[in-house]
DNA sequence: GTCTATAATTTGATAGAC
DNA sequence: GTCTATCAAATTATAGAC
């Protein structure tokens, strides 16, 4: 009953930090901004996350679990392969539209060589987990797009183009294209 | 003979700034870093580019012309469609391996909502030009991957995954996959 | 846990001499 | 064009009171 609520304040901080990062990258989040967003002082944020890489890693790990949780079981035998990949695409599309920002992994992946090591390691681990999920989802699927890395990186790129050109539909079209050529 | 060399110093500054941006994003470049990289003082950089958005826009525009120059004619009738797209892929792959950094458009596209307006406009214009080139290159090509935006965004995402997982080959594999399903 | 206060550094930017 | 000198603001981070 205590461990269950997982610390309310920490969650608020992580949610705020995630928003800032997803809009402008790791350098676009600051202790002051997060603090005033949450309604506390920056020193209080330092209490929970002493150094900035700590904050970054926690944001990535929380995001990773949230997303994989939402994706659910990749190998439900009652679900055709196409539907599994469509589900992956919908998860990205939903978060793109709700938050009007690209995937956390995508922006931090793009900045990877400028990140503190601990954070970049967490981002790599996130991608590894996404690849595992997608490989399971694909099972023995065939077709020109039937590759976990290809599907994932195409989705990442589609999000970048969607926000850059302000065409959120480009992501949906990409998902359709990827799914249709699976068999 | 004066206008031809286009100002040596300005070029050095832009090349340095491009390197910093491509490694860590727009906030990862600073007047001081660029200055010491080039061997001058930060105030001298301000002389050429008074405000940071000026620098950002100039970097993007130079990159855009450099890349489109390297790509050459998208509609040479002696060249099959597959070869045109393979050429596009090789251009990205070469710069990924040489500079060990992703495309400038990709990282700035990912950060787009955190950029100064002038810079984000320049990035959008860059993508528009790349889409134009690719549409011309595709002509009336058919196949599940025969779409300019799909190809471009898949390449962008492939670069992100390639640097994140430290697998530069992922980009080459993506190019192959995109090309093979064109007809 | 959160606050006030403060330190040390970095950043974008300007004034004025050469 | 480049320099020295300088600034105001922002940033990460810490010490200590409540």
Image: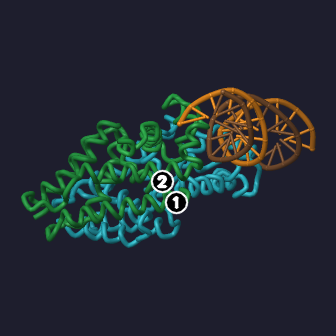
Chain colours: A green, B cyan, C orange, D brown
Q: Is residue B87 left or right of residue B60?
A: left
Residue B49, image x and y in percent? 65, 42
- Measured as percent of width and height from the top left, residue C6 is found at 77, 35
* Residue where numbered disc 2 is placed: A57
Q: Give the total of numbered labels.
A: 2
Where does the C terminus of chain B fall, quadrant-wise?
bottom left
Q: Residues within 10 Å of mark 2 (few under 14, many from 20)?
A: some
A81 vs B6: above or below: below
Tell me the chain of label 1: A
The residue located at (55%, 53%) in the rendering is A53
**Quadrant of the image occupied by residue B178:** bottom left
Task: Decide which of tag 2 and tag 1 comes sooner along the chain.
Answer: 2
Position of B44 compared to A100: left or right? Answer: right
- Graded by Cα atoms within 10 Å as few (under 14), some (14 to 19) or many (20 or more), the crowding at tag 1 reads few
Q: In x, y percent, where is residue B62?
A: 53, 51
Element type at mark 1: helix
Q: Is residue B4 left or right of residue A142?
A: right
Q: Residue B113 in the image: x percent, y percent?
A: 44, 38
- Residue B135 appears in view: no
Residue linked to disc 1: A118
Q: Residue at x 46, y 66 (%)?
A: B96
Residue B155 visible, this orientation: yes
Instruction: Describe the element under mark 2 as helix, strand or loop.
Output: helix
Q: Nearer the viewer, residue A165 or B131?
A: A165
Residue at the spot x=23%, y=54% of the render? B147
Chain where mark 2 sits: A
Distance CA(mark 2)–CA(mark 1):
7 Å
A24 lies above or below A108: above
Q: Quadrant of the N terminus of chain B?
A: bottom right
Mark 2 touches mark 1? (CB < 8 Å): yes
Is disc 2 in the same subunit as disc 1? Answer: yes
The residue lying at 50 percent from left, 50 percent from top is A56
């Amino acid at each position: 009953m205590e461990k269950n609520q997982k610390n309310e304040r920490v969650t608020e901080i992580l949610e705020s930090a995630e928003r800032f990062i997803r809009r402008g990258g790791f350098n676009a989040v600051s202790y002051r901004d997060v603090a005033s967003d949450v309604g506390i002082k920056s020193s209080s944020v330092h209490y929970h996350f002493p150094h900035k890489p700590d904050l970054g890693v926690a944001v990535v790990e929380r995001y990773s679990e949230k997303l994989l949780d939402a994706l659910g079981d990749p190998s439900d035998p009652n679900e055709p392969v196409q539907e599994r990949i469509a589900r992956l695409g919908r998860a990205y599309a939903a978060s793109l539209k709700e938050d009007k920002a690209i995937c956390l992994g995508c922006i931090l992946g793009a900045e990877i060589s400028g990140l503190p090591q601990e954070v970049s390691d967490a981002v790599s681990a996130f991608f590894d987990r996404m690849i595992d999920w997608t490989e399971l989802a694909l099972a023995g699927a065939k077709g020109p797009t039937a590759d976990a890395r290809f599907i994932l990186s195409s989705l990442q790129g589609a999000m970048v183009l969607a926000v850059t050109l302000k065409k959120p539909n480009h992501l949906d079209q990409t998902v359709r294209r990827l799914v249709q050529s699976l068999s």
